[in-house]
Image (tube, rainbow, N blue to C red):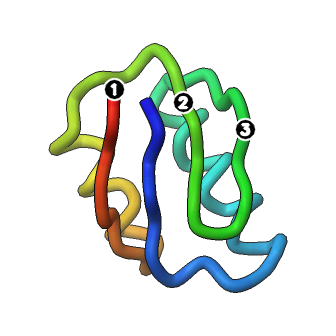
Amino acid sequence: MLLKIKGMGCMHCVAKVTKTMQELGATVKSCEIGACEIEGVDDINKIREAIEGIGFELISAEA
């Protein structure tokens, strides 16, 4: 699933999102400023809650 995320501006943000997705149980395929590709977690509500919980906004999620 490809996540488009608003508010990521540096590599610290990338690391924060990567760690958060791993804590949800996702496998992070790639993560860069503004986007993160994950596998293993399909619950968009959990993903959105986790992203917003660390101060970012989930713009879209494409399977």
Q: Where is residue 23 in the image (x, y as percent from the top left)?
A: 54, 36
| Along the viewing direction, whichever of 40 and 6 lies nearer the viewer | 6
Q: How far apart are marks 1 and 2 (CA)?
A: 10 Å
Q: What residue type is labelled 1?
A: Ala
| 38 horizontally vs 32: left or right | left
**View extreme (top): residue:** 40
Q: Position of residue 32 (x, y in %)?
A: 73, 58
Q: Which circle's residue, 2 or 3, is located before the other in the chain?
A: 3
**View extreme (right): residue:** 11
Residue located 33% across and 26% down the image = 63
Label 1 residue SS: loop
Q: Residue at label 2?
A: 38
Q: Which circle's residue, 1 or 3, is located before the other in the chain?
A: 3
Label 2 packing within 10 angstroms: few (<14), some (14-19), many (20+):
many
Give residue 12's quadrant in the image: bottom right
Q: Which amino acid does label 2 sit on?
A: Ile
Q: Residue at label 3?
A: 30
